[in-house]
Amino acid sequence: MKLFAQKLYQTYKNHKRINKPKLSCSDFTIHHYAGDVTYQTELFLDKNKDYVIAEHQSLLSVSKCSFVAGLFPTLAEDSAKSSKFSSIGSRFKQQLQALLETLSTTEPHYIRCVKPNNLLKPAIFENHNVLQQLRCGGVMEAIRISCAGYPTRRTFDEFIDRFGILAPGVLDGSFDEITASKRLLEKIGLEGYQVGKTKVFLRAGQLAELDSRRVEVLGRSARVIQRKARSYLARRSFILLRKAALQLQASCRGYLARELYENMRRDAASLMIQRNFHKYVARKAYKGLLSASVTIQAGIRGMAARKELLFRRKTKAAIVIQSHCRQYLARLHYSRIKKAAITTQCAWRARMARKELKNLKMAARETGALQAAKNKLEKQVEELTWRLQLEKRMRVDMEDAKSLENAKLQSALHEMQQECKETKALLVKEKESARRAAEEAANLRVVPIIDTPLMDKLTAENEKLKHW
């Protein structure tokens, strides 16, 4: 029924009459005019679903206890059959319906209520208004008549049960209730009372006097009981405290002794640990320095060897490139000079041939020997043409040779670049291997690496690079 309580909190969270307790999620508190009342919703509806078994009801109705038999009255046969599988909630509904039917067939009477104020608010009393209502209702007259007689009336068993502690000696069990009540009143010394057939009649104020005497007797008895209880509790507390103090002292002494022994043992252990730790730190520092020095020496020697190898390779490559460049420049200069000379010779010879041909043509006009000169000149022109073609072929061959030489130079330059790249890659690999070797040497705990295969290999490589 926690869900029911949560719905109440959500629906009436701002209502002044409903409040949520702090220590429970399934309860709710209603602020009545007489005080706060907390209701528990656990099994709020489940308990009304319990079935009333006819056999159990018939068994309890024949009980010898009048109270139990009154709670489970005998039902008619038809109603017993109809309620065989009914729950407590359904039974309550049936009884409520029967009560409503009875009220509808009768004329009920109601108790007259007095309104304390016209605002209908709690804890506010208007004396004049209340007094006027009491006078109009006849209550004041009834009180006056009751006070003039015996307003307080108690049955003998109630009177003896309440005020028997004022005179315990008269309640020895040998008297009936009437006689015991009379002896009790005589023992108390009360005057103006009357003893009837079933009740004791007291005047106004006598009941308050009896109550005050009863309160005094109860107060004295309570003080005696408190004194005895406090003495018992004080004695028991003292015994427990003494026992606890002894146990605490024993525990503290044992704890102090154990702590002292533990401190002594820890001091001895700490001295031993410190000695071994100092020895381990010193050994580790020495081995680290030795390994670092050996690794640094090997790295420096390898780096120097690689630098020397790289310098020699660069110097050799520069010399080769310079030689090829000079050869190429010399060939290019020679070919240009040769080409210019051939071109100049061809141009001069063509000019001289044309001049001679002109002269021959002028001479051939006059004589018959012009034909022979013409033939001679044609032969010379053919010879010059053949020579020009030969020069062109030689020029083409020269250009082919030059292109081939350029291709060779380009391939050589490309090979030198590849060698440089390989040298750089080898240098990077060597640096990486040296760095890894340094890291491995720093991480390894076994320091001596002298005369290992790797050291021999590096030494041989350094010697080889020196003689390159």
Image (cartoon, rainbow, N blue to C red):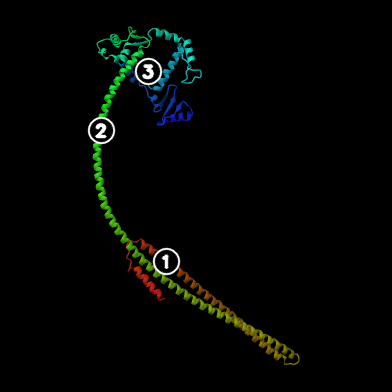
Within-10-Å neighbours for mark 1: few <14, some 14–19, many 20+: some
Cβ atoms under marks 3 and 1 closer than 8 Å:
no
Inter-mark Cα distance, 3 to 2: 62 Å
Inter-mark Cα distance, 3 to 1: 106 Å
Which residue in the structure is indicated by mark 2? 240
Residue 266 visible in image = yes
Q: Is residue 267 left or right of residue 404?
A: left
Within-10-Å neighbours for mark 2: few <14, some 14–19, many 20+: few
User: Nearest the camera: 260 or 334?
Assistant: 260
Residue 72 visible in image = no
Which residue in the structure is indicated by mark 1? 431
Which residue in the structure is indicated by mark 3? 80
Seen at 37% across and 70% down, the residue is 458
Instruction: Give the residue type at disc 3.
Output: Ala
Seen at 47% across and 10% down, the residue is 135
User: Nearest the camera: 432 or 367?
Assistant: 432
Q: Nearer the viewer, mark 3 or mark 1?
A: 1
Mark closest to the chain's N terminus, 3 or 1 = 3
